Image (spheres, rainbow, N blue to C red):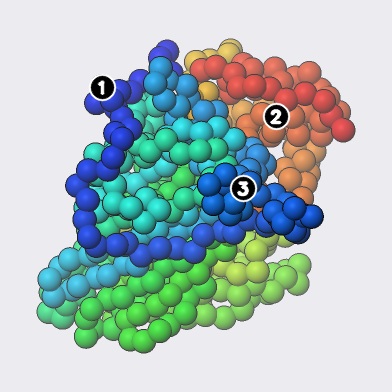
Amino acid sequence: MREDRSGWIVLFGWLAACVPSTPEGETDEQGEEASKSESDTGAESDTGAELGTQTDSDTDEPEPMPQCEPEAFAHAPAPIEMPDYTLVPIDVLAVEAELEFDTAAKLALATASLVFRMGETSGLPLLDLRQTPTEIWLDGEPLALDRFSIVDLGGGPETTLRVLEADLPACSDHELTLHYPLARPLALNSRAVSFFDEPAGVSFDFDMSDADANRYLESWLPANLPWDHHSLRLSIHVAAERAHSVISNGTIVPIEANTWDIEFPSSTSSASPMLRIVPSDLIVEDAGELVTSEGQTIAWRIAMPGTLWLGPSELADDVRVYLDGLVERGLGPYPWDEIVINIRPDSHGMEYRAATSTNLQNLEHELAHSWWARGIEPATGSDGWFDEAFVMYVVEGPLGGLGEPWNIALYDPNPFVRKTEATAYVEGRMVFTRIAEVMGHDELMAAMRELVEQGVPRSLSTPELELHLYCASGEMPEIPEIFANYVYTLGAPELLYGCP
């Protein structure tokens, strides 16, 4: 994103008495359920029981043994042990949501289901949603609204999450279903759904941002932190006679007028999906293919205000020039086979996977994020500094002035931090300038390009980046010194050692 502009665990007092023995506020209405993942039960044994199952002593019916996938939690925060309970990260497997927009009543409603798997520690699941549920079900059973509370994880509003106050066993699968009106998200600088009169219509945008906390998928749907990946399916209906369009980097399946399904792959993170809904008469749209100077064919889809002085085809020519320039600067081939561009009339710019929603001025910057941010993805909010810093280094060039070790925030060791500090754009750019001075510009670009060539999308932590650059430099001691003096000034993470 381009912006033109020590206590660790603190819990709200009302959380101390969590996990009531029975749900409150039960309702007869049942939520829609997403399909659950099924565990392989193995072959039958000589005793009649199945391998990988356990037998209930009363019924002698086999029950699936819990199955864990520790690798799914590679970048997850550690469980948080409290006096009476444990807060634990979860692995989200799938999110499904129905979004209904009633333009006559000026009302938007959501039904969302999140299927998740517990890790190797039992406890109270951590996730997020910046909307206010009116009904909640856990595994088909009603759950009291006050058992989906907000918890401060050591840094005020920039580290808050939701805690599901239900003590769940390790390695078990569950489904959380919620109903709620789509209101302005509980996040700084967020925007509400906009409705139009005469003719009636709606404008809706995921409108993500890394400059403010809580502005990823959690603004609108139940979601995890960016280290997690899962499938996402949206069913969207706009009740209006006025024709509407959807702009998204997902696979769009038209159902009927103003009704769509949108599918996102299992590699989707909370920061990667783009969605905008807008009356069709307010934009111009087109699609086609461009061929880069290296011979790479890239499909493009562009939507933009009809009031601009150029059209989608002309802008696609500019995109080709930008992509050629970024390749020439050493980023390597564009890592996707398509690009979706939504041109905005305001100053905001944001990167999505193989897509961007931006103004014309920031287009090159946001395209560069196709390699770094939504190709190689910062594993956590703590790591969000390096994609902005490196993109600034590539697009704007080196920036000197790196002085004595400072106390400026780049890497925040709190694993629950939710935003990228503005220092990433200037001081972070200086850090990469200094690394290039030590190991050489071409060597730095080759090392960064190698990470992309190893496959995207892929999550990367700051310690993993440091180790990679250290090894690529021939184990130059200056590399860890730069990170120690200028990146880890708020506290160092667990560092990695050993080059292959």
Q: CA distance from mark 2 to mark 3?
A: 49 Å
Q: Which residue bears the numbered disc 2?
A: 466
Callout 2 amino acid: Glu
Residue 352 visible: no
Q: Amino acid at mark 1?
A: Gly
Q: Position of residue 375 (x, y in %)?
A: 62, 52
Kindly state the secondary structure of the residue where label 2 is placed: helix
Foreground: 248 or 416?
416
Question: In the displayed structure, does residue 215 sit left or right of residue 62?
Answer: left
Amino acid type for the residue under numbered disc 3:
Thr
Viewer-side label of 1, 3 = 3
Q: Quadrant of residue 327?
A: bottom right
**Residue labelled with disc 1:** 13
Which of the 4 image quarters holds residue 15? top left
Q: Is residue 354 left or right of residue 129?
A: right
Q: Residue 55, which numbered label?
A: 3
- Give me the residue at 20% from left, 72% from top: 102
From the image, state whether disc 2 or disc 1 is nearer to you: 1
